[in-house]
């Protein structure tokens, strides 16, 4: 049986099925420039929306999961022409390297379960509320005043 789910219906199904915990979900659908298919963008941020000036900034960036689902029909209500959609991850700072989801191809109905499961699992992790906890090394460059002192004219 062919899928009848379009990109907007897919996004609403993910919203209804995912357990967000304390986090929030941002979703959008867009049509590719070549007008051949629609895609769904799903961003899950595992911090309350009032943290980091409205959920933005370094705190939100260190606790986000950005996912794309491609291959829906050209209109927002059109099902995928092939019957399947493709899942890919854009950014997964929220998850450790060994827990990051891999790309997958499935029907939109099965993909709803897959994406909602990833979001529900990610929502169970404790958020990193310290911007320095991103795993990046601090910048070792000396302060400007130190550089000026070392200059010889």
Image (tube, rainbow, N blue to C red):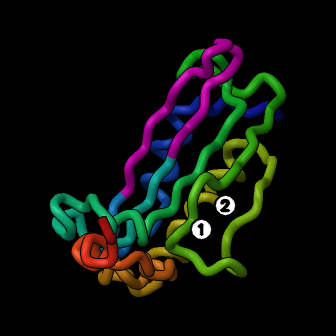
Few, some or many residues within 10 Å of mark 2 (<14, 14–19, 20+): some
Q: Main secondary structure of the magenta part?
A: strand
Whole-percent x, y for residue 99 in the image: 67, 78
Is residue 38 covered in magenta? yes
Quadrant location of residue 46?
bottom left
- Identity of the residue drawn at 61% across and 25% down: 38
Residue topped by disc 2? 114
- Identity of the residue drawn at 50% across and 42% down: 11
Whole-percent x, y for residue 65 in the image: 51, 62
The C terminus, quarter of image: bottom left
- Identity of the residue drawn at 51% across and 35% down: 9
What is the magenta range? 25-41
Quick one: 137 or 58, which is closer to the camera? 137
Q: Is residue 91 above or below residue 152?
A: above
Whole-percent x, y for residue 101 in the image: 70, 66
The N terminus, quarter of image: top right
Numbered label attached to residue 103: none
Q: Is residue 69 left or right of residue 13?
A: right
Residue topped by disc 1? 118
Q: Is residue 29 above or below residue 107?
A: above
Q: Is residue 114 above or below residue 19?
A: above
Quadrant location of residue 104?
bottom right
Label 2 and label 1: CA atoms lie apart by 6 Å
Q: Is residue 126 left or right of residue 146?
A: right
């Amino acid at each position: 049986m062919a899928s009848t789910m379009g990109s907007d219906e897919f996004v609403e199904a993910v919203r209804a099925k995912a357990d967000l915990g304390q986090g929030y979900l941002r979703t959008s659908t867009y049509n590719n420039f070549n007008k051949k298919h629609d895609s769904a963008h799903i961003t899950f941020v595992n911090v309350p929306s009032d943290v980091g000036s409205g959920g933005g900034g370094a705190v939100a960036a260190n606790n986000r999961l950005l996912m794309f689902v491609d291959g829906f029909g050209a209109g927002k209500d059109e099902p995928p022409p092939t019957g399947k959609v493709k899942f890919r991850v854009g950014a997964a700072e929220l998850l450790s390297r060994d827990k990051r989801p891999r790309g997958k191809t499935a029907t939109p109905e099965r993909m709803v379960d897959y994406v909602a499961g990833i979001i529900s699992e990610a929502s169970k992790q404790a958020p990193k509320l310290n911007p320095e906890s991103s795993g990046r090394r601090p910048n070792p460059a000396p302060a400007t005043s130190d550089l000026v002192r070392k200059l010889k004219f």
